[in-house]
Image: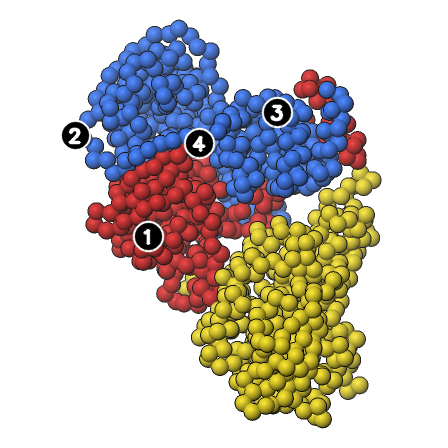
């Protein structure tokens, strides 16, 4: 196994290597760095060290020639003859990335819905639409969609492929990535092109909790990433025209290993938190019927919606359409008030883009406080009733 | 009938605290747990075993301390466990992880079903399940919230309920297959003391395989085999005011409403 | 070879159970004063009650150390649940385990270890607390059976137990040497109990008086030999005291954790109150008490597991850990200031519950005398 070690004669104890290490594998003890066993030999510390004190016997991996791979692709997801918002959001981002690479944007449209969705894709930023029309693609199935998309990827060799992190996207993207031999980064919150290397920089919240990680995909193409709905912004629509390329679903009848017997939507109106101007979020600290009643009242007095963390949904205090976070919805309201919400990174990933953030928590170490505009360190059962009474007098 | 359940030991991210001054993560005292979704996967497997007989094996990949996750799974009722642990596995992305797991599964002589949690609370990628299904050429169903019928065997089938945004799907799937499950599927049982103690004492209950045991070279696993690399990590931008309001409940509530009014939020 | 450490693993599993399932409902159970049936049954399904019994009779094959770990962790969440559990693991079932017939094991012990039946231990009488020579519940042989008459008090789980291990006098002239334990199922004629007592703390534990009015039991319900009742009690006394020490240890941890958290969170005069030296002094004393109690509890448990005689160590452990828990719960209410007096915070419960430990497993005034006796006084 290769390893990384430190030439202590050159080391000046500046600690940059420890700061740079994404695996917490460099520890500073008495001003001297030590490499711990969790080192993965990623060699990032070598780049960080200004004095060349970090050494390795690792041989650099050669990057294959990917010059044949061109253009930015977006998987266009649709439901009941309407494009999903995520597809338009991704096209906006794809356009920006393609411009930096002096390339074009293509959308992938699978299904049997005919042409009505093609023009909206052009309008949203696609230069080209690859369309595969087949009754067998009417409903999403893992096997048929993976097969169809893998063939397109292999035929046209895109440089970048973006997919929405929806139920379908999360089922499809990893399977497709594995089939075409591409690396995949899930749930990116930022995408940009590295100005020097020209590769896609994929940024996502990572464990390590409070950290964002920028991930690259140097050794395979396409560079694949998924993005959650609501994270990117749509472009203003333009009356553009583009090229339509019709493709066939090859092969005989798909031997369908998975068959959809029926689909149904849940009774009752599901709430769309992404449209709420004000959101009051409940965390474990509010896990009681009294707590939720208070927060509901607060939400009402501000004309907002009540939402919750993953724990609140798992413990069935709130229905699952009110979950904010990495496994729930991503929201960007004008005002977010987290009450008894500790603010785990998964939750913050779903609300960090809110315009104003307020945290009410007993614990001054709760991570939500670090991203809040205003924080109240105190008991929500005492603070919220005061808030409600003051609001009732002032509004 | 045999079911393989994939489990991951993760830090309990709900217990993570930040240093109020530096904003750094306070790692100390954060317990390691079986990833919550994986616990539901194991429970689903145990219920199928109770209904149809057979065996449940758990497979995990992680540092040596992850042995506790495997032992606990045995405590819940799994019959055998395998821990893949080797320093060469460090830094694996989902590409490398799914490959390494697939090699272990090929070594584990046969199965009717692979169950795993939809996603892990530390990485939250939800990728390893589908990627593993692809390598093993299995049909997959993600986000399963119910298994209504299960008929293992030569032309085995299973009917499952899948959670999709706004509703459900009922699907028929051939076996062997890979399902990823969500927490809605069941309430996991607690481990049994006698089984836990047996997992700690019995020599044969848990196998520990390293890179060589899987017939792999170190350059075929871990970071060396990964297609994606983390190139930098940084704290999220906070360009926030980060003002802490002080005083008794009435006073802080008043200060807050003042600020809402100043910023035309109400 | 890679294996989990059984003590760490069991502590981890029980700690998680306490954090997820006990602590969220502890206040509510305490307020209502109800026996937490669901939690009790869950502990049964986890094999907790069989922790110190061998697998052959449905136990989990553990030992006293593991038993103490479980008692400690549960006490951190809800002392009364921990106390009832400890009773079910040891005093409520041990006589039945050691002296019961195969039939009795099948009908009573195995279900009890699964949480399906509850066992109670009947020692104390109005006139016989520490002075067991004065036990007045009598068992008189009548042909092939014994007839039991008398009453017991301060009986943990008394009103809800399915069976009882009862200390009786078979020969009043012999005093301590006439004592003997009997097994008494609750459904036999002549058995009854009072309504539950109102108590200051451990309010989910149901305590009552128990009455025996010509209760006739077969002679195989004798637990141990005639006149050996005291010996039977002494054989588990060290374990009872080590376990009580473990309960105190868990309660002490709960009080210290709450105090520490509050000392960091509560801001007065612009700084956390934990920055004040007087608060630091209280926390420091708790920390030292905690460490000392922990060492004593697990040293005693280890001695019991290796069959060393250790009643003296166990007595000191129970005495010290309990006093330490009482000090810590008292100080915790002070660190919390007015909120320590409020029913909204759990520290008041820790304070109330701590008093239970002073009596269970031997009153401290007698324990101190026992300790002194060890040194020839």
Instruction: Work out whether residue A59 or residue C294 is closer to the camera in this orientation and state it.
Output: C294
Identify the hue of chain B.
Answer: red
Q: Which mark is residue A266?
A: 4
Please tell me whether mark 4 or mark 1 is closer to you in this view.
Answer: 4
Residue at label 1? B3
Q: Residue at x 34, y 37 (%)?
A: B170
Residue position for label 3 = A304
Q: Do the residues indicated by labels 2 and 1 lie within the same chain of the protein?
A: no
Q: Chain of mark 2?
A: A
Looking at the picture, tell me which residue is in the foreground, B107 or C330: C330
Is A21 on the left-hand or right-hand side of C377? left
The CA span between labels 4 and 2 is 35 Å
Circle 3 marks a residue in which chain?
A: A
Q: Which residue is mark 2?
A: A252
Secondary structure category for the residue under label 4? loop
Q: Colour of chain C?
A: yellow
* On screen, residue B37 above or below B236: below
Q: Residue at x 24, y 24 (%)?
A: A135
Q: Provide the secondary structure element on which disc 3 rests.
A: loop
Residue A347, image x, y percentages? 55, 35
Report if the CB atoms under discs 3 and 2 are less than 8 Å apart: no
Q: Badge 2: few (under 14), some or many (20 or more) residues near its Cα, within 10 Å?
A: few
Q: Position of residue B185 (x, y in %)?
A: 43, 44
- Residue C235: where, in percent of width, then height? 61, 82
Q: Residue furthest left?
A: A252
**At which x and y percent is residue C198?**
74, 62
User: Quick one: which chain is blue?
Assistant: A
């Amino acid at each position: 196994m290769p390893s990384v070690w430190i030439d202590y004669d050159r080391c000046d104890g500046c600690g940059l290597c420890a700061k740079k290490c994404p695996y917490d594998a460099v520890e500073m003890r008495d001003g001297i760095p030590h490499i711990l066993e969790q080192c993965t030999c990623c060699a990032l510390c070598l780049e960080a060290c200004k004095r060349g004190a970090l050494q390795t016997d690792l041989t650099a991996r050669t990057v294959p020639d990917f010059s044949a791979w061109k253009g930015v692709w977006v998987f266009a997801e649709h439901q009941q003859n309407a494009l999903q918002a995520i597809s338009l959001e991704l096209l906006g981002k794809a356009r920006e990335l393609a411009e930096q690479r002096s390339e074009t944007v293509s959308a992938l449209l699978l299904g049997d819905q005919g042409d009505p969705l093609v023009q909206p894709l052009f309008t949203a930023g696609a230069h080209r639409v690859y369309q595969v029309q087949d009754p067998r693609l009417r409903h999403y199935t893992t096997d048929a969609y993976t097969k169809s998309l893998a063939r397109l990827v292999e035929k046209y060799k895109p440089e970048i492929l973006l997919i929405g992190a929806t139920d379908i996207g999360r089922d499809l993207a990893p399977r497709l990535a594995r089939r075409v031999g591409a690396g995949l980064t899930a749930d990116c919150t930022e995408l940009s092109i590295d100005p020097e290397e020209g590769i896609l920089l994929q940024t996502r919240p990572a464990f390590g909790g409070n950290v964002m990680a920028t991930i690259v995909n140097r050794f395979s193409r396409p560079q694949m990433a998924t993005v959650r709905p609501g994270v990117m912004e749509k472009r203003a629509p333009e009356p553009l025209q583009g090229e339509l390329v019709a493709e066939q679903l090859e092969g005989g009848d798909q031997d369908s290993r998975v068959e959809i017997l029926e689909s149904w939507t849940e009774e009752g109106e599901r709430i769309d938190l992404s449209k709420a101007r004000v959101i009051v979020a409940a965390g474990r600290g509010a896990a009681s019927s009294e707590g939720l009643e208070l927060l509901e009242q607060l939400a009402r007095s501000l004309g907002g919606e009540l939402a919750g963390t993953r724990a609140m949904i798992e413990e069935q205090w709130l229905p699952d359409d009110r979950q904010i976070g990495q496994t729930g919805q991503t929201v960007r309201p004008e005002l977010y008030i987290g009450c008894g919400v500790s603010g785990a990174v998964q939750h913050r990933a779903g609300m960090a883009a809110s315009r104003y953030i307020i945290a009410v928590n007993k614990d001054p170490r709760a991570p939500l406080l670090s991203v809040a505009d205003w924080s109240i360190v105190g008991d929500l059962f005492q603070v919220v009733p005061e808030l409600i009474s003051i609001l009732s007098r002032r509004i | 009938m045999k079911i393989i359940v994939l489990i991951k030991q993760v830090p309990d991210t709900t217990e993570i605290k930040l240093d109020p001054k530096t904003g750094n993560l306070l790692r100390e005292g954060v317990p390691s747990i079986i990833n919550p979704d994986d616990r539901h996967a194991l429970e689903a497997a145990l219920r199928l075993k109770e209904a149809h007989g057979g065996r449940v094996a758990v497979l995990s990949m992680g540092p040596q301390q992850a042995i506790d996750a495997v032992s606990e799974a045995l405590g819940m009722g799994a019959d055998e466990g395998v821990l893949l642990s080797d320093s060469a596995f460090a830094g694996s992305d989902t590409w490398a992880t799914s490959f390494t797991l697939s090699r272990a599964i090929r070594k584990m002589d046969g199965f009717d079903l692979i169950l795993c949690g939809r996603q892990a609370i530390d990485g939250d990628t939800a990728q390893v399940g589908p990627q593993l299904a692809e390598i093993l050429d299995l049909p997959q169903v993600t986000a399963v919230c119910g298994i209504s019928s299960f008929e293992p065997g030569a032309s085995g089938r299973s009917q499952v309920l899948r959670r999709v945004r706004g509703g459900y799907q009922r699907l028929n799937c051939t076996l062997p297959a890979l399902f990823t499950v969500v927490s809605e599927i069941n309430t996991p049982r607690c481990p049994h003391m006698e089984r836990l103690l047996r997992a700690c004492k019995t020599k044969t209950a848990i196998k520990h395989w390293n890179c060589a045991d899987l017939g792999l070279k170190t350059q075929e696993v871990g970071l060396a085999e990964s297609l994606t690399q983390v190139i930098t990590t940084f704290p999220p931008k906070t360009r926030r005011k980060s003002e802490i309001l002080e005083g008794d409940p009435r006073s802080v509530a008043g200060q807050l409403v003042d600020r809402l009014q100043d910023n035309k939020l109400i | 070879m890679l294996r989990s450490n059984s003590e760490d693993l069991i502590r981890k599993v029980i700690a998680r159970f306490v954090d997820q399932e006990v602590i969220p409902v502890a206040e509510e159970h305490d307020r209502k004063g109800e026996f937490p049936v669901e939690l009790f049954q869950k502990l049964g399904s986890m094999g907790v009650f069989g922790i110190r019994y061998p697998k052959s009779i449905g136990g989990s094959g553990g030992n006293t150390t593991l038993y103490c770990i479980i008692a400690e962790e549960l006490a951190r969440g809800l002392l009364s649940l921990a106390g009832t559990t400890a009773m079910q693991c040891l005093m409520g079932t041990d006589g039945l385990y050691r002296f019961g017939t195969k039939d009795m094991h099948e009908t009573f012990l195995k279900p009890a270890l699964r949480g399906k039946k509850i066992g109670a231990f009947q020692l104390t009488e109005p006139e016989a607390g520490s002075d067991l020579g004065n036990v007045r519940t009598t068992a008189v042989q009548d042909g092939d059976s014994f007839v039991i008459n008398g009453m017991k008090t301060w009986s943990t789980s008394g009103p809800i137990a399915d069976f009882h291990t009862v200390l009786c006098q078979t020969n009043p002239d012999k005093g301590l040497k006439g004592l003997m334990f009997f097994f008494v199922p609750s459904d036999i004629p002549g058995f009854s109990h009072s309504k539950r007592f109102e108590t200051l703390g451990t309010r989910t534990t149901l305590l009552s008086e128990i009455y025996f009015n010509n209760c006739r039991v077969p002679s195989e319900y004798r637990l141990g030999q005639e006149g050996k009742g005291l010996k039977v009690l002494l054989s588990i006394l060290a374990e009872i005291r080590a376990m009580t020490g473990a309960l105190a240890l868990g309660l002490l941890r709960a009080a210290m954790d709450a105090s520490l958290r509050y000392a960091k969170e509560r801001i007065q005069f612009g700084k956390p109150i934990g920055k004040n030296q007087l608060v630091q002094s209280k926390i420091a004393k708790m920390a030292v008490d905690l460490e000392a109690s922990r060492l004593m509890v697990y040293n005693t448990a280890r001695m019991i597991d290796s069959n060393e005689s250790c009643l003296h160590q166990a007595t000191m452990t129970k005495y010290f850990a309990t006093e330490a828990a009482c000090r810590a719960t008292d100080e915790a209410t002070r660190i919390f200031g007015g909120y320590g007096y409020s029913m909204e915070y759990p520290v008041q419960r820790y304070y109330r519950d701590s008093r239970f430990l002073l009596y269970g497993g031997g009153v401290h005034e007698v324990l101190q005398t026992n300790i002194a006796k060890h040194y020839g006084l």
